[in-house]
């Protein structure tokens, strides 16, 4: 079952592909082009048969000979079936896009990270896969605002993976300040996805910070909810805000793929109050050729 934490971590990885580019180059020194084209790719990595092979996310950087693919998975518990599926993801992505591809696994739990980092032997001599795992052990403690602004993708993912770190409050302070220095729309969505990705005391601390409404991106977030009638109470505001966020995700995917969205489509998406329906539309938005096709 897809949990809110699972969804939040996935969204952090694909919210801004430029920020993710910087984060991955910093963590793993991947041969991703330093600049240029970046787009979401279809996470459906199935062959032309009835079997379903779907990753949590897929990114395609560059074009022509410089293309490089990144498959993103969020793993909250060991699942030995993935030791077979992940190899299939990479093989199918490479075959479809005709380019190199790597697998990045986000693990908020140290025990799961150790499991995910194991080398996967294929049986063919010299051919093995060692997933690139993002976890608390290899993400830095960022307590310098300028460093966080320079690589906001890394600062955000570090905030989540360092949720149990003794310096979590200092880390959270810095990422809050860094969010004030970037595009406000991107900032409030990062703030929301951080909230989804955290748990326990760390999530309650981030909730407290969001409730203070003392920062520009938080204020804009609250104003948007109020304008839509989404903040009638703390609990109601959280639930309805999550629904609004899912609706925005549908439109964002269409926009990133360059698909025009009519006012009629926009109104229907934002008018939907069923989170399962919005999730279905989001999955369709990854592959459709026109915005209206998400409703078919």
Image (cartoon, rainbow, N blue to C red):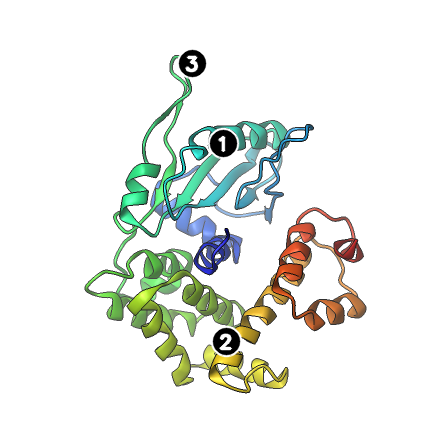
Residue 100 appears in view: no
The residue singled out by tag 3 in the image is 124
Sequence-wise first label, 3 or 2: 3
The answer to whether residue 68 of the structure is visible from this angle is: yes
Asked if the residue at tag 2 contacts the one at tag 3, i.e. Cβ–Cβ closer than 8 Å, the answer is no
User: Where 27 sits versus 100, above or below?
Assistant: below
Q: Are marks 1 and 3 in contact (CB under 8 Å)?
A: no
Q: Residues within 10 Å of mark 1 (few under 14, many from 20)?
A: some
Residue 179 is situated, as x and y percent measured from the top left of the image, at 42, 70
Q: CA distance from mark 3 to mark 2?
A: 50 Å
Residues marked 1 and 2 touching at CB (< 8 Å): no
Give how far across and how far down residue 267 sits, in percent: 75, 72
Question: Going 68% across and 28% down the picture, which residue do you hit?
Answer: 49
> What residue appears at the point 52 percent right and 58 percent down from the top-left corner?
15
Cα gap from disc 1 to disc 2, whole angstroms = 35 Å
- Residue 95: x and y, percent? 60, 27
Q: Which mark is residue 238?
A: 2
Residue sitting at x 38%, y 69%: 178
Q: Is residue 58 above or below residue 161?
A: above
Residue 262, picture quadrant: bottom right
Circle nearer the viewer, 1 or 3: 1
The secondary element bearing badge 1 is classed as helix
Please name the residue that numbered disc 1 is placed on.
85
Q: Is residue 275 left or right of residue 204?
A: right
């Amino acid at each position: 079952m897809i949990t809110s934490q699972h969804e939040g971590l996935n969204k952090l990885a694909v919210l801004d592909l430029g920020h993710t580019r910087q984060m991955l180059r910093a963590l793993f020194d991947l041969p991703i082009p330093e600049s240029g084209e970046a787009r979401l790719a279809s996470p459906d990595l199935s062959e032309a048969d009835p079997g379903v092979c779907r990753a949590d996310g897929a990114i395609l950087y560059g074009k022509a000979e410089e293309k490089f693919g990144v498959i993103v998975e969020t793993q909250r518990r060991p699942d030995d079936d993935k030791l077979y599926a992940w190899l299939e993801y990479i093989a199918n992505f490479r075959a479809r896009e005709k380019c190199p591809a790597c697998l990045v696994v986000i693990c908020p739990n140290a025990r799961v990270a150790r499991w995910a980092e194991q080398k996967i032997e294929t049986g063919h001599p010299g051919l093995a896969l060692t997933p690139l795992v993002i976890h608390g052990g290899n993400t830095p403690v960022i307590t310098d605002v300028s460093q966080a602004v320079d690589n906001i993708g890394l600062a955000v993912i570090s905030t989540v993976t360092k949720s149990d770190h003794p310096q979590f409050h200092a880390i959270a302070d810095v990422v809050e300040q860094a969010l004030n220095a970037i595009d406000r729309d991107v900032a409030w969505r990062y703030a929301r996805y951080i909230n989804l990705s955290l748990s326990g005391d760390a999530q309650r601390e981030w909730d407290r910070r969001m409730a203070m409404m003392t920062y520009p991106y938080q204020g804009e977030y609250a104003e948007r909810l109020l304008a839509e009638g989404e903040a009638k109470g703390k609990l109601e505001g959280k639930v309805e805000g999550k629904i609004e966020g899912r609706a925005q995700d549908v439109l964002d995917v269409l926009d990133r793929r360059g698909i025009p969205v009519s006012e009629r489509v926009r109104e229907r998406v934002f008018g939907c109050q069923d989170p399962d329906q919005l999730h279905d539309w989001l999955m369709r938005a990854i592959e459709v050729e026109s915005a209206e096709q998400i409703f078919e």
